Image: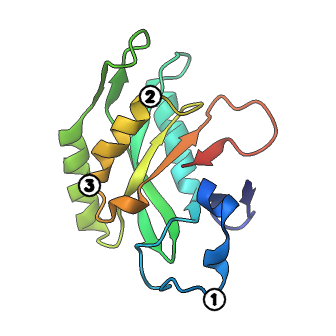
Amino acid sequence: SQSAQSDGPLRTRTGRAAMDDRNDDPSSSIDPLSTSHPTTKVQVHPLVLLSVVDHYNRVALDTKRRVVGCLLGDVSNGQVDVSNSFAVPFEEDLKNADVWFLDRDYLDTMNSMFRKINAKERVVGFYSTGPKLRKNDIEIDSLVRRFNSNPDTNVCVVVDVRHTSKGLPIVAY
C-alpha cells in the first residue's frame, strides 16, 4: 500500500511491512538503532521524483526505453529515506533482455562526488522508469549493492512515468 503527505516526502511500504508490522512495536526485540533489521518503509522525497521524470524526459521521452539511476539517502530504524538521486547512463536491448549496459565507472565517479558534497548521503538503491520490474533489475540490483555500505537495505524504486490511472505512480521493492 502507498500513501503520501502533502507537506512531506512520499512514503511507501515494502512487501515485508505489509505482512509483518512488528517493527512498529517499541517492545520489539529488534535494536531500533541498528540498520541491520529489515526495511519496512521507504520515503522518497519529491525532488527525487522530479529528477527521475526529468531524466526520462531528457533521454527516453516518446520511446519504449526506460531510464535507470542511483538513489541516495540514509537508512535508520528499518526506514530508507531517499533524499537525492542521479542519472546513470543505461541501455538495454528491447528485443533481448539479456543485453544491457549500465556505466559502472560513471556510477563510481558520481558516487564519489556526491559523497564529497554530502557525506551523510549514501547509495541506498536504484530507480527505474518501469513501468514494472524487469528481468535485468535483479542484475542491476546486485551491481548497485556493491556501492551500498549496507547492501541488505538496497531498494529498487519503479516510477511509472506514463501513469494514467489514479494512485501514486511509484512502487518500492
Residue corresponding to mark 3: 147
Q: CA distance from mark 2 to mark 1?
A: 38 Å
Q: Tell whether label 1 touches label 2 (CB within 8 Å).
A: no
Q: Earlier in the sequence, mark 2 or mark 3?
A: 2
Which residue is nearer to you in this view: 33 or 48?
Answer: 33
Count of all numbered marks drawn on residues in the image: 3
Image location of residue 161, percent across then percent down: 61, 33
Residue in view at x 60 percent, y 59 percent: 16
Residue in view at x 51 percent, y 38 percent: 54
Res. 5 mark? none
Amino acid type, label 1: Pro
Res. 26 mark? 1
**Is 29 situated left or right of 106 in this image?**
right
Q: Residues within 10 Å of mark 2 (few under 14, many from 20)?
A: few
Amino acid type, label 2: Lys
Image quadrant of residue 151?
bottom left
Q: Residues within 10 Å of mark 3 (few under 14, many from 20)?
A: some
Residue in view at x 26 percent, y 64 percent: 115
Residue in view at x 19 percent, y 49 percent: 109
The correct choice, above or below, for 128 with respect to 63 in the image is below
Image location of residue 71, percent across then percent down: 42, 53
Outermost residue on the top side: it is 95
Residue corresponding to mark 2: 135
Image quadrant of residue 112?
bottom left
